[in-house]
Image: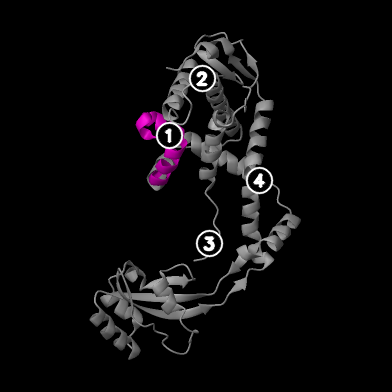
């Protein structure tokens, strides 16, 4: 059960966006200037224009109100903080609009089918992440919630296409990481194990005797096991030390593997019942070769570089954009 998986891209993206939102409040003196301040917007209801796309005052007010509500416990309730909070919110809206415009330019979009599929497939994961991100559905209308979900899907697509896929990783970097992190690429010894769980000790004794006399182990699992792994004929996969409770591991790792025999364990008691294990295959401890480890190392190195790469990409979008903020409107707006 050796696993080197990385966090999902969308979880990383949500963390980046969340940290961007609150960094100014949490770090004293971390003053972020809003981009290209000016007061040239002709219509009162538009608070900012991004490449001729107008962001309404009402939309800003809604985002500001939600921000103040969600982080009221996290942020110091001081009126002097409000200008900084408004800068955070206005810049978040600008960032989203720039990403949307770039997505449109690149032909990246999100269909209604994708949104519905995402809701159906990952609703529980999304709601967990969204709660961390401050997108509790109780604060949003159904339309707003789906719009936020759509925004996250667009962001994820753009980050994958324009950021992660373009992060350079050299052969030297991969080799260097492999040499200095060899423990990470050592696969420990393990046994491929099947399990049968019985309700009573007496039943376990009788079943173990049948196994030793030659009755097919998987047949007995199907007929008698009370464990959920019954659906896979008791197959637990490869078990490493640390995967199971100590009393089970002590029995599984008690002696060397006997490929020519039945290799059946003694009876092991747990809170779930009485277990009998069958060791079917031995996997020796070994270190992955550089060739085998290369894809995983590349993922790790991309993960280490992705925050900085994302910020550089976003900054480039801003530098190439024409952004105008109505400062008078921003200063006067209270967000309540």
Residue at which label 2 appears: 82
Q: Name the residue rendered at 49%, 71% in the picture.
A: 241
Q: Closer to the camera: disc 2 or disc 4?
A: 2
Residue at mark 1: 135
Q: Is residue 320 visible?
A: no
Write down the residue under mark 3.
3
Instruction: Judge left or right: residue 294 versus residue 235.
Output: right
Q: Most extreme residue toward the bottom, as rendered?
A: 213
Measuring 58% from the left and 35% from the top, which residue is drawn there?
107
* Coordinates of residue 157 in the picture (x, y in percent): 55, 41
Whether residue 146 sits left or right of residue 298 in the image: it is: left
Residue 133 visible in the displayed image: yes
Mark before the other along the chain sequence, 4 or 1: 1
Which one is earlier in the sequence, the residue at label 3 or at label 1?
3
Query: Which comes before the other along the chain, label 3 or label 4?
Result: 3
Residue stretch rendered in magenta on the structure = 123-149
Q: Nearer the viewer, mark 1 or mark 2?
A: 2
Q: Is residue 250 magenta?
A: no
Residue bearing the label numbered 4: 305
Decide: is 45 above or below 78: above
Q: Quick check: 27 above or below 279?
A: above
Helix, strand or loop at disc 2? helix
The mark that comes first in sequence, 3 or 2, is 3
Look at the image and say whether residue 137 sits in the magenta stretch: yes
């Amino acid at each position: 059960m050796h696993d080197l998986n990385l966090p999902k891209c969308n979880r990383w993206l949500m963390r980046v966006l969340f940290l961007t939102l609150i960094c100014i409040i949490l770090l004293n003196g971390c003053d972020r200037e809003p981009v290209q301040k000016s007061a040239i917007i002709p219509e009162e209801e538009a608070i900012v224009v991004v490449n001729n796309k107008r962001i309404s005052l009402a939309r800003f007010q809604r985002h500001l109100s939600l921000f103040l509500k969600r982080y009221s416990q996290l942020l110091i309730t001081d009126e002097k903080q409000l200008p900084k909070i408004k800068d955070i919110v206005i810049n978040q809206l600008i960032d989203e609009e720039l990403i949307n415009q770039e997505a449109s330019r690149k032909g990246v979009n999100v269909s209604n089918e994708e949104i519905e599929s995402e809701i159906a497939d990952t609703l529980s994961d999304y709601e967990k992440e969204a709660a961390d991100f401050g997108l509790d559905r109780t604060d949003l209308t159904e339309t707003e919630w789906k719009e936020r979900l759509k925004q996250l899907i667009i962001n994820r697509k753009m980050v994958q296409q324009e950021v992660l896929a373009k992060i350079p990783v050299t052969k030297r970097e991969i080799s260097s990481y492999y040499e200095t992190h060899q423990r990470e690429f050592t696969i420990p010894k393990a046994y491929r194990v099947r399990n049968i769980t019985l309700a009573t000790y007496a039943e376990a004794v009788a079943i173990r005797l049948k196994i030793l006399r030659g009755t097919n182990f998987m047949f007995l699992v199907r007929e008698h096991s009370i464990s959920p792994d019954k659906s896979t004929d008791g197959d637990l996969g490869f078990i490493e030390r640390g995967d199971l409770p100590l009393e089970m591991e002590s029995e599984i790792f008690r002696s060397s593997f006997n490929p020519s025999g039945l290799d059946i364990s003694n009876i092991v008691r747990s809170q779930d019942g009485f277990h009998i294990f069958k060791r079917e295959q031995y996997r020796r401890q070994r270190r992955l070769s550089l060739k085998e480890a290369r894809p995983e190392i590349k993922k790790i190195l991309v993960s280490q570089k992705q925050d900085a790469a994302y910020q550089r990409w976003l900054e480039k979008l801003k530098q190439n954009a024409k952004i105008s903020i109505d400062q008078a409107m921003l200063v006067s707006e209270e967000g309540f």
